[in-house]
Amino acid sequence: MTDADQNGTSEPYAVIAVAGSGAIATGLASLASCHAEKVWLLARSTESARRASESIGASCERIQGADADRVTATTDPGDLAGAELVVEAIVEDLEVKAGHLREIGGQAPQADLATTTSSLSIGELGRAAGLDHRLFGLHVFNPVPVMNLVELCLPDGLDEGIGERAKKWCAGIGKTAVVVPDTPGFVVNRLLFPYLFDAVRFRERTGMSPEGVDTCMTLGVAHPMGPLALLDLIGLDVATEIGKALHADSGNDEHLAPASIADLVAAGHLGQKSGRGFYDYD
């Protein structure tokens, strides 16, 4: 099997759980419903579970073969007991993720475990959670139903069979899985974020409008979205954490989020999800 592989059709997981209630989590749960017999989504509150259920219902209407009736949002980790794959998709914080993985790994002792982290070392996270033999990286991209790439990180020491099951599952949901090294940012974010942050610094220096910068890149380079709009989509808080992780590995200050991003985050303007970032969405 090559590093980039989309072969294989058998479904390795009948019961899947996703821990989280944001866009990545709900997108994954919706897509998983195409083939899994049962999908659980673990939310931290009743309100988060309600919002996630609404998002999944709307998403499943747009995905061929998806079935929202197969997805149940819950706040009880015990509901994950029968899961065969559990995907963690919460905040980009190693200690928080490790604690959550310990809890859900204990509730689903037979499950393969995955994390959608886009910036943390999979091996380090697995060791922090005491689950390095079960945990692999499954970095999907937003919007999950549309973006076809999965960066699949299979660190040393994984139990036999997990890597092959992960590849088959990715192929089954229509994704191209590329096996990537366990390095902060993997491939995409390692190459993407210096460009995104440089676009912000360029705007800071020149006073150019977000619309102007983004129009130049969409029309001049045929990018589907300009860098500032993309940062708003990613979330400025998430982008900040990714930058910190890249900087911790490289020592390059250009990997840190620029000052104007820090100012927006401090004001609670996180991008699309908060209604305002470089653009207003209200």
Image: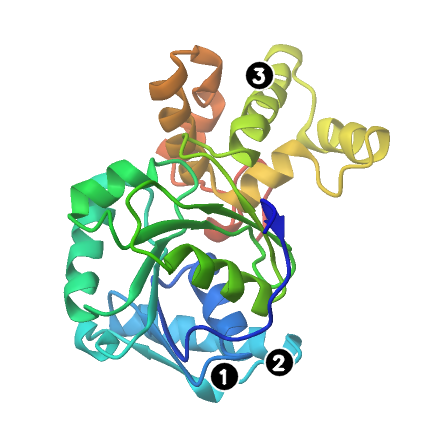
- Marks 3 and 1 sit apart, C-alpha to C-alpha, by 43 Å
> Three-letter amino acid code at disc 3?
Arg
- Residue 201: assigned label: 3
- Looking at the picture, the colour scheme in use is rainbow
> Which residue bears the numbered disc 1?
68
Circle 3: is it few (<14), some (14-19), or many (20+) Cα within 10 Å? Answer: some
Q: Is residue 188 above or below residue 167?
A: above
Q: Amino acid at mark 1?
A: Ala
Residue 178 against residue 65 in the figure, above or below: above
Q: Earlier in the sequence, mark 3 or mark 1?
A: 1
* SS for dot 1: helix
Say what amino acid the circle numbered 2 marks.
Glu
Horizontal side, residue 270 vs residue 1: left or right: left
Observer-nearest residue: 87 or 58? 87
Q: What residue sits 48% from the left and 52% below the top? A: 273
Gap between marks 2 and 3 measured at Cα: 40 Å
Q: Circle 2 — which element?
A: helix
In whole angstroms, how far apart are the C-alphas of marks 2 and 1?
A: 8 Å
Name the quarter where the C terminus is drawn: bottom right
Residue carrying label 2: 61
Q: Are marks 3 and 1 in contact (CB under 8 Å)?
A: no
Position of residue 84 measured from the top left corner of the image (x, y, whole percent): 33, 72
Front one among 175 and 274: 175
Among the two numbered marks 2 and 1 on one chain, the one whose residue lies closer to the N terminus? 2
SS of the residue under disc 3? helix
Q: Is there CB contact under 8 Å for labels 2 and 1? A: yes
Position in image of residue 94 (x %, y %):
25, 40
- Image vertical order of residue 147 relative to residue 238, above or below: below
Image position, residue 6 (x, y; %): 64, 58
Q: Is residue 143 left or right of residue 53?
A: right
Taking the spot 82% from the left edge, 36% from the top edge, the residue there is: 222
Measured from the top left, where is residue 244 in percent x and y?
36, 25
